[in-house]
Amino acid sequence: MQKNTAGYVFPLILLATLSISFFIITLVQLQSSHHNQLQHLNSYQQALNVAYSVNVDVTGQIREKQWVNRFFKGKPFIKTGQTLFGTTYDMAVEDHEPAKYTFNVKIRTTIGDKRNLFYWRQRYVPNMLDFTRVVFPVFFGEFPPEMFEPAKKAEIDKLVDQSLKNAADNQSNLDEIIKRVAQKNTPEDILKELGALPPGKSAGDLKDAAKPRPVVAKVPTKPSTAAKPKISEINEEIKSYIDPIETTNYPATGKIVEDYWSVMLRDAPWGNVIDKIPPLTTGLNVTGLQGDFFEVEYNGKTGYSHMNYVWIPGHTPSGIEPPRPPGAPPPK
Amino acid sequence: MKKRSGLTLLELTIGMFLIAGAAVIYLQSMQSSKKKNEFYSEHFIASIMAAKVVEACFQETEINPYGIEALGLADENGKPFKFSTMVTEGQTTFFKQPEINKETTPFLYNMFQKDFMLNITTDESSSRHFTLNTAFKWKANTGPGSFNYLCRFPGFSPKKEIITTFAFPEDKLEKKVVERIFEEKNKNLGAIVSSPAAREVSLATGRIYFTCAGMLSAAQFKTAMEKAETIGSEPHAPTSAKFFEGTEHYFNIARDVLDVMVYLQPHIETINKDIKTIESMNLRNRSRLEKYIVNATMGLDEIKKLFLVCVHEAASRYRAMLNAYSDNRQQRALIQRCLDMHRLMFVAREFGEGTFSSSDANTTIKSEYYEFLADLEKYFSDKDQTLARLAAQEKKFAQSDLLKKRYYACDLVYKIFATLATLKTKLPEVDPGTLDPRSDVIGKPMGDGTRSGALTWARDQLNGGTGEGLNTNNGMKTRDDVSAWNNWCLAFVATAYGRRLNELKELSAITSYENFNRAGKIKTDKKPPAGAIMYTGPVPGNPHGHIFIATGKFKNKDPIIITTGGPGLDGLHEMPLSQLLAWAGGKYLGWTLPKDAKQEN
């Protein structure tokens, strides 16, 4: 029987050619996929950079005005279709009621057909002592881009609130774990403590599992040893100049602290004596303060008695005879 | 016909062409693929590296308002410039830790050796931020490669404006000033003070005085002061909640005081500028206003001391906490607070008199700050370059006296304290007034047991008085002999007080002083009111100390007193305390103000 080999090689060659073609197509697609991944990565970083930059600008605006004059006071500040570094973005800044000094910043970026929504909840630092700190972030996260819309505000805020609540709820557990882990000295002990070894693995399988972790040196700062006056001592000094009585609300119920002499009731500060209030009189109706004299109602008369002799809540009288000030009418 | 076996030449030729063609396409694809893969790989790494630069800038500016400058992306005047460098072997600060070198990262090293250049262009495009263009450029096999990120970073110290919650309400201020300072009712300030500038001084004084009073009596402020002192004196570990609570109380006091002082700064300036305009006011109103100006200024000066003490204590406690924590995030937060507080103390150090009990404020504040910065720089040099750079930069700012220029709050605090110091030198000598004289003790052998009686009687023994006071120890009167009270200082003061004060019934002045001192009734300042009993300590040759009476008057803040004489100073004299100290020697011990004795005592 004759062997028929005609037409055998040609199909083989065709097959080989086709295989190479498929291989090349696959290779090209793989490259294209790499390219897309890279582009996606860069786009994401670009979106993040733009959102961060817009937030930098928001905090910059806040620091230029008093909090009471913030640009989003009273109503949300929303801008759409803005452009920064060639990227389109939408932004919304609004107070986070009822928390004081707290505000939310939502920034949605659009690069090609890809959208990202970044969300910051931030707190303004309303004091001068923290002067290099204008705001600090309470929360940062990403959400589906459609949640930018004002109608979704409650939804997104709820998610953030829940996230913060979870973090707060877990804090004590976290503290406990940190405390426990801090007492362990090797990776092996730590993994056992956390129960974090993968199934079927023993600590011995891990490199340097029994190697003690390096001792972390503490920042070698020390508290001051310089002695200072006590706060209470300084407070007494301040009070020798500034009398906190200024904030007392009138009328107040007062009493005379002088236990021997009668106290003058005058028609005006350093004015004529219209009556004398007996020592240790109580239940006086004190209606105001004029100069260094309380306005007092006594015996059906309204007059003035020196604050050195009259006690009211928040004021401890010295009981000391006051000098007659220069220019005051001379005694009669 | 014979059937052909094998391949024809044509078939063979076509086959060869197809195989050759496929091979060429394959090889070209492989070559192209290799190049593209290499490019993508380089591009990917470049983007990661650029992101690292962006992250480094973020980390730097998060804690350091001048982070862009610390990174070398702006000059010392804050002016931006272009930056271009290789990135291997620590040639740029962004790739120093870890360094890209042949030994540890050979792949990266080989790649970045291929003319990879990091280019950063800083643009000071706004007063709010810098814009950084971070780019990598390299020579790829497929042509020039380039990649860049644009991002904004805060680059300046923020200006904050503060409205304190303790500000006295403006709508109530004029009424309060009229009533409290000028003792009037239902009058406009304009009817009392005609000069507009003096009116402004009056209102500024009221703002300072009543705002400070409001702060001091506010429940939260009082609680913070009490708790700071209580918890601060207890031995708590720096990591404990109690230690943190105590520290926060010190911080909160300093915070509230600073906010109040910032709010009051323009009003201190008003008084400082226009204090002379009150001279035209009538005596009574002027003396009232002068009293309030002095009290507001001196009160504010003491509040400044409270601020410095609390800031120093809080900073000291934060340092103790820093020493106890190893978490970088906590360390950063503590360092930021510590630095802010040290900065304020540093610029205020020349006004820190009285902040420390036994050391000089200027030296203490300066040395503690430099020590703190040196500790930070050393410790973080191999752990957190951002913090090491920050400490080095801060040291430079401090040494070059740049803190005021760089930090708005520092400049403000310096201005407040400097204005306050200037104002203190302009303060009028306040006439505290006089006790109404007790005419019934004039010409009598002793006083009536009251302060005014004591002072009236003491004056009556001076030259020009009746001199009828009787020294029962020697039976003498100044009417007959000016030396009647020489060396009988305790007897003189006891007689002025009608011999009714039990504390004065002693054998020596120093023993009577101890009686008052034990009861906590001695004040050590030099502001004794009229009739106060004053003391100086023993000297060689006089172990008994000295006792005398304050008139309530002052000359250049030096209290005027009435004293008995002795060797070298015959008779009774009215003189400034400093003159007495020069004559008698001895340490000034203080004064006490006895309550008026009851008649039946």
Image: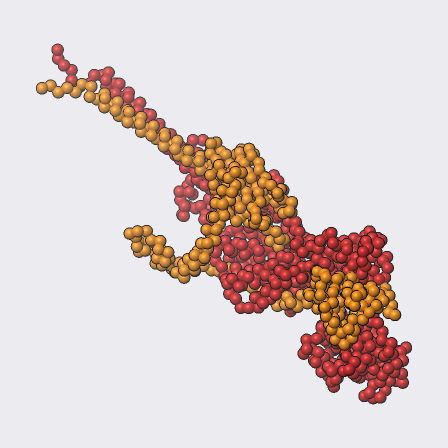
Chain colours: A orange, B red
Q: Would residue A174 be seen by someone viewing this image from the given angle?
A: yes
Q: Position of residue A111 (x, y in %)?
A: 49, 33
Which residue, as the protein is rendered here, is positioned at the far front? A300
Q: Position of residue B280 (x, y in %)?
A: 86, 57
Place of residue B89 in the rendered image (x, y in percent of width and height, measured from the top left):
46, 46
x then y, percent, for residue A197: 33, 53
Is B233 left, or right, of B500 in this rendering? left
Above or below B26: residue B384:
below
| Residue in the foreground of this view, choosing between B107 and B130 | B130
Of residue B598 and residue B376, the one placed in the foreground of this image is B598
Q: Which residue is pictured at 71% across the width and 75% down the height? A: B522
Q: Residue at x 49, y 59 (%)?
A: B325
Q: Is residue B548 above or below residue A191?
A: below
Q: Give the residue drawn at x 81%, y 53%.
A: B188
Q: Quadrant of the C terminus of chain B?
A: bottom right
Residue ID at (78%, 55%)? B201
Q: Is residue B516 above or below residue B37?
A: below
Instruction: State left or right for residue B163 relative to residue A306.
Output: left
Residue farthest toward the bottom in the current orientation of the protein: B474
